Image (tube, helix red, strand yellow):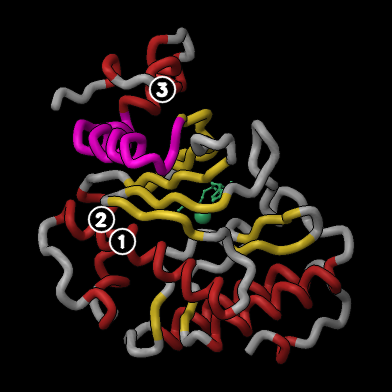
Amino acid sequence: MKTDIETLDWNVGKIYQSRDKEGRKTVDEVFDQATLKHIQQLFSRGIIATIENIIATGKEANVFRAKTFDGRNRAVKIYRLNTATFRKLERYIEGDPRFRNSGNNPRERVFTWAQKEYKNLHSMSAGGAEVPKPYHVYKNIVVMQYLGWRYKPYPTIKELPPENPGNFLNLLLDSIKAYRNMKLSHGDLSEYNILNVREKPCIIDVGQAVPKEHPMYDELHKRDMKNMYRFWNRKIEQLNEEVFI
Ligand SMILES: Nc1ncnc2c1ncn2[C@@H]1O[C@H](COP(=O)(O)OP(=O)(O)O)[C@@H](O)[C@H]1O
Ligand SMILES: [Mg+2]
C-alpha cells in the first residue's frame, strides 16, 4: 500500500498543502513514513476520522486534536520514532516488569513506550485519578480523551493557576492518592503536566510512570512531591509539607 501525505484524505494533507509554513514543518517532522502508515491504520480501523490541528510539539512527542467518525474530539499523542526518544525512555522501560519481553530495537522500544503510557492512563483512571481517559494505542500513537476547547487545550496550572489553590490542591491530592493506591509513581509531576480543567485538576503525560517493582519508584515520587511542594508553597500560605507524602 502506498502511503504518503498526498494519498491521505484528511486534514494533515490540508495542512501540508497549505501555506502554513510552521504546520508543514511539523508534518514533515512528525510524520515519517512509518508513522503515516500507523495513522492510516487508525483511520481504516475507524478509531479516528480526521486530524484537526496541532496542539503541542515536544521533543519526544507531538499532540494533535483529532475527531472520531461520530464527531467527538480526541487527543492523539504521537511519539517520534528517533533515537533521541528511545534514549530518553530507556531507563523507565528497563526495570518495569510489565514490559520485560518487549522489543529490542529502538523503534519497538518507542512502541513499548506508547503501550506504557496507555497502560498507566488505564491503571490511574481505574484507581480513580483524574487523567485523560485512554481509548486506543497503536504502535507509536496513543489516543485519549481530549481536554479542551475547540482550538486549544485547557491550560496547564503553570499557564493558569487555579483561582482557589487550596480547593484545587485537595482535588489533586485525591488523584495522587488514587494512583499511589495503584502502586505507581508519576515521575514527571509538575505544573507543566497538570491541566486546569475548569478549576479541576487533570494529570497528563504519564508515559514515564513506573510501578512499585521499578528501582526508581521511590526516588521519582519523592522528586514529584518536592516539585509539588515548591509550586503550591508559593500559592498557599502556611502549607504543610507533610501533605505531600
Ligand atoms: N488529553 C489531552 N487533552 C488536551 N490537551 C492535551 C492532552 N494531552 C496533552 N495535551 C497538550 O499537549 C501538551 C503536551 O502533552 P504532554 O503529554 O505533556 O507531552 P510532552 O511529553 O511533550 O510534555 C500538554 O501540555 C497539553 O497542552
Ligand atoms: Mg508534558
Q: Tell me if mark 3 has few (under 14), some (14-19) or many (20+) residues whose alpha carbon lies within 10 angstroms of its own.
A: some
Q: What is the CA distance from the residue labelled 3 to the residue labelled 2?
A: 25 Å
Q: With 162 as the anchor, is 85 left or right in this view? A: left
Q: With 11 as the anchor, is 244 left or right in this view? A: right
CB-based contact (under 8 Å), mark 1 and mark 3: no
Q: Residue at x 26, y 82 (%)?
A: 97
Q: Is residue 164 visible?
A: yes
Res 110 label: 2
Give the structural element (helix, strand or loop) at label 2.
helix
Q: With 158 as the anchor, is 124 left or right in this view? A: left
Please name the amino acid that badge 2 sits on: Val
Q: Residue 197, percent across and down? A: 73, 55
Is the shortest distance between ligand 1 and the CB of mark 3 under 8 Å?
Answer: no
Foreground pick, 145 / 104: 145
Is the shortest distance between ligand 1 and the CB of mark 1 under 8 Å?
Answer: no
Above or below: residue 228 compared with residue 194: below
Q: What is the CA distance from the residue labelled 1 to the residue labelled 3?
A: 26 Å
Disc 1: which residue: 113
Question: Which quarter of the rendering shows the C terminus?
Answer: bottom right
Q: Tell me if mark 2 has few (under 14), some (14-19) or many (20+) residues whose alpha carbon lies within 10 angstroms of its own.
A: many
